[in-house]
Image (cartoon, rainbow, N blue to C red):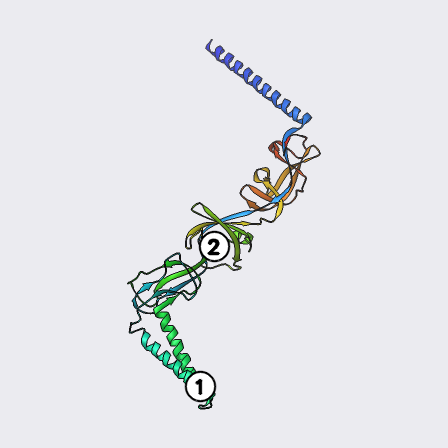
């Protein structure tokens, strides 16, 4: 009796399974029949050309477009600082001065020698003009004066340190009464209406970055723009990368010299090309395909691709302006299959 119950249960289960499979096949065939008669529902997009931009982001330290440091020439105590950070100075303005009584500077001695040489030259010039001395004697006196003048200028520069260029004082490294040694950096003058920075780009990045490409720099919620000014043609062996120089407009000194900024370079902005989303491209055996609407039928078309940026792929061959690219339902398609457009853009 028990065996009969088991057999009956297996029989009922088998009938139910067969019935379920039959209904599933019936529904499947019904759907296939609808597709065959009315076409597979798809959405399409009309192909147009648009601008293609490749973005590469870096981080680098920015500095003034022109910057110059002034260093101490004597070992002495800082006597006076005439400007502060942020002040604008003209070239040759005295920024830091040292005592003039430092024996090693020989300020007074050199000044006296210069004044004596100048007085002697004036006297010898009058004598030469009146025929009182030879040209040789006059030339010797003039040479001695030039040597004395050069010595005097060097001594003045050592105790009265001047701005090497016109610009804004971006850094002062000493305070009054500080002791310094020859070669110590005293201050920096920067021209910050423009900033510059050097980036290091990989081989693939350097291949697309061109002089003139648009650049955006971001720092603490601020943004300024500029251009790529130079792309090195040879690989830096120590960095294993290509140097890329950028210049940025910094009117109003919104960015500070020396800050670390995020730099984005936009390459190829002027190019108009055909762009498709990566999800609409089918990859088979190292070849790439898309489906297009060809007279109400799906045409599987091979394409050649170029640059990529995020989810976008450039199509350099295989698609033309005006083609209707199938962007929805393509996974259900076979080449030559009837389609029904239910949405287009």
Q: Could you say which is closer to the camera, residue 232 or residue 78?
A: 78
Instruction: Examine the rendered structure and indicate whether residue 209 appears above or below residue 154.
Output: above
Instruction: Mark yes or no: residue 196 visible.
Output: no
Across and down, in percent, residue 241 comes to: 48, 56
Across and down, in percent, residue 29 comes to: 63, 23
In the rendering, which numbered label is found on residue 333?
A: none
Q: Which residue is mark 2?
A: 200
How crowded is the residue under tag 1: few (<14 C-alpha within 10 Å), some, or many (20+)?
few
Instruction: Examine the rendered structure and indicate whether residue 109 appears above or below residue 17.
Output: below
Residue beneath the point at 35% across and 76% down: 111
Q: Residue furthest right?
A: 295
Q: Residue furthest top?
A: 1
Q: Could you say which is closer to the camera, residue 273 or residue 114?
A: 114
Across and down, in percent, residue 200 comes to: 47, 54
| Sequence order check, earlier mark of 2 and 1 | 1
Number of marks present in the image shown: 2
The secondary structure type at the circle numbered 1 is helix
Q: Give the quarter of the image for residue 257.
A: bottom left
The secondary structure type at the circle numbered 2 is strand
Residue beneath the point at 32% across and 75% down: 108
Residue beneath the point at 36% across and 71% down: 156
In the rendering, which numbered label is found on residue 126?
A: 1
Q: Could you say which is closer to the camera, residue 153 or residue 5?
A: 153
How crowded is the residue under tag 2: few (<14 C-alpha within 10 Å), some, or many (20+)?
many
Q: Quadrant of the C terminus?
A: top right
Across and down, in percent, residue 285 comes to: 59, 42
Instruction: Examine the rendered structure and indicate whether residue 147 appears above or below residue 1.
Output: below
CA gap between label 2 and label 1 equals 64 Å
Left of 336 or right of it: where is 212?
left
């Amino acid at each position: 009796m028990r065996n009969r119950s088991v057999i009956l249960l297996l029989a009922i289960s088998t009938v139910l399974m067969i019935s379920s499979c039959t209904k599933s096949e019936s529904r499947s065939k019904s759907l296939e029949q609808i597709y065959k008669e009315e076409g597979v529902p798809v959405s399409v997009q009309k192909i147009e050309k648009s601008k293609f931009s490749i973005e590469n982001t870096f981080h680098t330290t920015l500095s003034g477009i022109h910057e110059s440091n002034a260093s101490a020439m004597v070992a002495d105590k800082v006597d006076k600082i005439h400007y502060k950070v942020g002040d604008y100075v003209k070239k040759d303005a005295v920024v830091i001065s040292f005592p003039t009584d430092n024996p090693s500077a020989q300020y007074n001695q050199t000044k006296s020698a210069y004044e004596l040489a100048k007085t002697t030259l004036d006297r010898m010039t009058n004598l030469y003009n009146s025929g009182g001395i030879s040209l040789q004697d006059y030339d010797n006196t003039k040479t001695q004066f030039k040597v004395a003048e050069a010595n005097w200028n060097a001594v003045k520069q050592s105790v009265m340190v001047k701005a090497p260029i016109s610009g804004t004082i971006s850094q002062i490294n000493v305070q009054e009464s500080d002791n310094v040694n020859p070669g110590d950096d005293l201050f920096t003058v920067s021209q910050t209406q423009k900033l510059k920075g050097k980036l290091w780009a990989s081989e693939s990045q350097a291949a697309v970055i061109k002089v003139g490409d648009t650049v955006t720099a971001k720092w603490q919620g601020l943004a300024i723009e500029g251009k790529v000014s130079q792309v090195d043609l040879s690989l830096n062996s120590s960095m294993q990368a290509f140097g890329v120089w950028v210049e940025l407009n910094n009117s109003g000194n919104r960015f500070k010299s020396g800050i670390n900024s995020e730099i984005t370079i936009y390459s190829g902005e002027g190019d108009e090309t055909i762009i498709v989303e990566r999800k609409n491209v089918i990859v088979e055996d190292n070849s790439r395909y898309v489906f297009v609407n060809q007279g109400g039928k799906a045409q599987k078309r091979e394409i050649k691709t170029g640059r990529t940026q995020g989810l976008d792929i450039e199509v350099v061959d295989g698609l033309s302006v005006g083609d209707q690219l199938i962007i929805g339902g393509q996974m259900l398609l076979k080449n030559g299959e009837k389609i029904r457009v239910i949405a287009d853009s």
